[in-house]
Amino acid sequence: MLELAADLLERTRSRTPFVVATVTGVAGSAPRQPGSSLVVDADGAVLGNVSGGCVDAAVHEACQEMLAGDRQPQALRFGYSDADAIGVGLTCGGTIELLLRHHDPDAEPELEPALADAASGQAVAVATVVRGPDAHLGRAVVVRPGRPPQGSLGDELLDRVAEAHTIDLLHAGKTGTVEIGVADSYCREPMTLLVESSTPPPRMLVFGAIDHAAALARLGTFLGYRVTVCDARATFATPDRFPGTEVVVDWPHRYLQAQADAGSLDGRAVVCVLTHDPKFDLPLLTAALRMPVAYVGAMGSRRTHEERLTRLRDAGLADHELARLHSPIGLDLGARTPQETALSIAAEIVAHRHGGTGAPLSTGVPIHHSVTHHAVIHRSVPSPRPLTYSS
């Protein structure tokens, strides 16, 4: 739902009810991941999709029925049906599970602030019971860092447990499911929470104001990164050369360290070093490879890479730190132009982020990489007592 926050915020402000069908679980070659949503509002408008087209029509019909009738949360499941090749099912062979929820802005005061935060890039997460006892199904709690949660799952202790799980995924900037089992002693029946996280865009820091940087900045913005191009040479680091991109004139290692000290970098940030100059590269990479960022890549030939490794070792970097360096940067696409090179860099960043191999899909590698999130409670919660459920 949060991926459509800006559009849904308009509905809440106009007091327009809507139904959201959200993917809560996938198996096999399912085209969309948990958190993906299709929305139908009371005016008939449709937003988003949950399958890339395979079952969207059937989900749309179910949403319309909920708008017109029973507003109780409803679970749906779609898989491949070999009995009817043109029937409703996923032609890719996967399986998706969904939860349909009716939202009335007048009855959910916590909904509009949550959507407003997500639409403006503020950190917010929504934890919803997607499997479990009927009395709790569809209930949700809104969590923000450093602020009391809003909403309730139907029990004070369960709210605290959900908050602790949710804040972990929110800090990681991840959306996923959390299992709360009987063994946890927090509930008498197993529950599954879908945690939808919305966080500020991850940072992409591109060092070196060259043509490749301009192309990479455009791709990075397209992929959802907040892109900054930094170079110590004011002649090259100009807004005219990088329209729509934040441009900083500063020594690269100094700017990077300042961003880290200000808390502006997290585990999703990527650093791309395109400077081609040891006086910039070495202090910059020495700092970057010791920071908990997601990706550090550096442009250069294989000979340049080997010389760079020697200098970095001389600067005191250990083998496990050097192993984090992606150099020469990018995947082998046979790139020639700055635009093609930028594509190869972006492809490597995406592959690294999601555990892809970079191999052609025709070789038989998995099309969709499934990631299971296991949140761990690191904060103190009250002594457990079994939850009771209304009949």
Image (cartoon, rainbow, N blue to C red):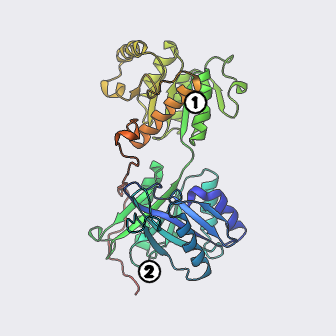
Residue pictured at 41% horizontal, 29% vertical: 290
Determine whether 258 is above or below 170 in the image: above
Quarter of the image with the C terminus is bottom left
Q: Residue at x 50, y 67 (%)?
A: 141
159 or 301: nearer the eye?
301
- Give the quadrant of the N terminus: bottom right
Q: Residue 94: x and y, percent?
A: 39, 58
Residue 145 can be seen, yes or no? no
Q: How many marks?
A: 2
Is residue 345 visible to us here? yes
Q: Earlier in the sequence, mark 1 or mark 2?
A: 2
Identify residue for label 2.
Answer: 135
Toward the viewer: 7 or 291? 7
Amino acid type assigned to the residue bearing label 1 in the image: Leu
Q: Which mark is residue 216?
A: 1
Q: Hey, which quadrant is residue 245 in on the image?
A: top right
SS for dot 2: loop
Q: Amino acid at mark 2?
A: Ala
